[in-house]
Image (cartoon, rainbow, N blue to C red):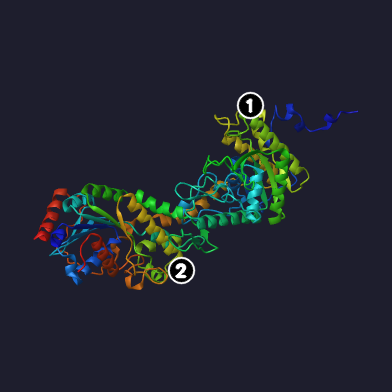
Amino acid sequence: MQDPYKSVEDRAFWSRAVAREFDPGAVSDRPPFTFSRQDTFMSAGSCFASNVRRYLESWGCTYTVAEYPHPQWPESRETLYYEAFSARYGNVYTARQMVQLLQRATGAFSPAEEYWVNPEGHFVDPFRPGLALRAQSLPEFRALTDQHLAAVYRAVEDSSVLVFTLGLTEAWYSADDGAVFPACPGTVSGSFDPDRHRFVNFTVDEITEDVKRMASILRSINPTIRIVLTVSPVPLVATATGRHVLVATTHSKAMLRVAADTAVRDDPGMAYFPAYEIVSGPQNQGTAFEADLRSVREETIETVMQAFATTYLKFPTVSDAKERSRSDATTEDMISQAFADECEEMMADDQLRPIVRVPIIETIPVPSAPVPTSGILHRLGAVRRRFDR
Amino acid sequence: MLIERQMETRIVVIGQSNARALRDGFECLVRDRPKRLGTTEVTVVMKRPQDLALSSWGPDGHQQRIAPQAMSEVLKQISPTHVVLMWGGNQMNLRAMLATGPPFDVVLPPALGVADYAPDSVLVPCAAVVAYVRNRFEANAELGDVLAATRPLQAKCLFLGPPPPLPGTAVRERLRDEAHFVGVMKKLGVDAATVQLVPDTVRKKLWVLLISTYQAFAAEQDSAFLPPPAGTTDALGMLDQRFWGVDATHASAEYGMRYMDEVLSWAGVCSS
């Protein structure tokens, strides 16, 4: 009888599919769904997820943006990753954090640690601690938070696909109600309170359950939304487990990888895309990361996203999409530019009709070159002497 | 004693387009109440693109135009006891009088007003509005030069705030005659009849933030701040019709007269 390996495809053999002729576009399992030009995308997750938007947009895909800086106020553009996603949630590192964000957007959860107040008296969002533009009052903080959560809800409503990248298993949470923070209090902002802030390293079961809860809440808002899960290949910055960071990273990524596989197994509306494997596999021979061995090189990101396109996008990616994207930006730039020509002197009174006519006794013609200072002072002195009489 | 003190009072008001109302208002003040000035010397220096326009008040009354580079020399020569700055002031008119994109709103801190907002609008954080105004101050080399020229004078320094915004109806009537806004509207592909204006309620809030930013900036310069004169707004907080200037953004000489009256009081010049 023929052994079972005789009938499997080349992609099942390391020597044929990885060691030689590695094809990133062939790594993914056959997806349960694909996407057309009519699909609308949103993304969330760790910093690796921020790459999704710019590639999708460059291919001419519709990326949902429900929260954005007002074009008339370029100063309202946020920094870090707050403009990289469908709303200003920034990096969502854990599945629990995503569940919590969706619960807040649906009104099912209100964290006890609603805000922190910094030394300047401004209000800091514990769940978006890196926001540069901080509310100056509690009413403003609540209004901006409400606006943000409404945008999250709208983004889910308006999207047919969510690409979610699982980033971390380690998190800090509030002992008051279990609300998880994206960063340990006291690092990016706020202050650490050992009686109030606790560390957790989520288990595979907890992560799996959180991913399922995430899918459930998403579908309560948008029943037809499909979910693509990925695992970030970016190693931990630091671990609070006391272990070596390499061991902690391997442990975390392994748990996330198992949880992702487990969550999608019985859910036809959810798929796993192997970005982690394409970046972290030995086929890259150490070329996937920058010199810090943590940041993924742009060429590697491009490889991942091309593999994503091969797997999911059943239409040719538009070659001039980047050009069209720039055109959109130009429209916004034009509006900003129209309002940026803000020289006060453009509005100086030469354009105004005089109301009170003051007799001009002495008018010195406007010089084409700087007027000698001594001449000015001489004339000014003459005027002052007359006042002094 | 009083006369001696007034003789020692030399006030220089330095500003851009909003200084015109002060200059013209002061002219009215001198004409209507000549004893108000006494022997105090007041000079209004308007910084314009091509020159400095000096208007000095004394027995004769004079205007001069001199090169813009001469600001520090002018100040040294006058040796003022009081420097009053009415710098800029049209930041919000330039940025947020004409509307484009979706409606926006801000939520004022309770100390500055009612913390309400239009629910369907995009909220612009107050911090972004303040950042815009502060950038305009901090990136303004001319203001930096004026402040640098003022510091060695040992003069008391006072910042004034710009006038409240005109109501939208008045703005629309005046827009077609203003080259700057006509140019902006042309870029946007609209005209004075069809252009959308930022609602009065929002423009009033932006002005409140503008004034509070001026106040904070003045404090950082170890200067005093005199808010726009009371009683010059209508029931909605916009500039009252009695004080509208001839264009969409500036106040009248009557407004300037009230403000200058308060400036004189601040400088210790007695009421007539």
Residue at 33 percent across and 52 percent down: it is B219
The answer to whether residue B213 is seen in the rendering is: yes
The answer to whether residue A316 is seen in the rendering is: no
Taking depth in this image into account, of A205 and A214 the one nearest to the observer is: A205
For mark 1, what is the residue? A285
Label 1 and label 2: CA atoms lie apart by 62 Å
Q: Quadrant of the C terminus of chain A?
A: bottom left
Q: What percent of the width, then of the height, locates residue A16?
A: 74, 28
Return the mark for residue B194: 2
Taking depth in this image into account, of A174 and B63 the one nearest to the observer is: A174
Q: Quadrant of the N terminus of chain A?
A: top right
Relative to A114, say whether A349 is above or below. Answer: below
Q: Is residue A131 left or right of residue B142?
A: right
Q: What percent of the width, then of the height, locates residue B194?
A: 46, 68
The chain holding disc 2 is B
Q: Is residue A141 left or right of residue B58?
A: right
Outermost residue toward the front in this view: A195
Residue at 39 percent across and 61 percent down: it is B93
Relative to B88, say whether B34 is above or below. Answer: below
Relative to A42, say whether B5 is above or below. Answer: below
Q: What percent of the width, then of the height, locates residue A106?
A: 65, 56
The kind of residue tagged 1 is Gln
Structural crowding at the residue carrying mark 2, measured as other residues with C-alpha within 10 Å and reported as few (<14), some (14–19) or many (≥20): few
Mark 1 in CB contact with mark 2 (< 8 angstroms)? no
Return the mark for residue B126: none
Outermost residue toward the right in this view: A1
Q: Are marks 1 and 2 on the same chain?
A: no
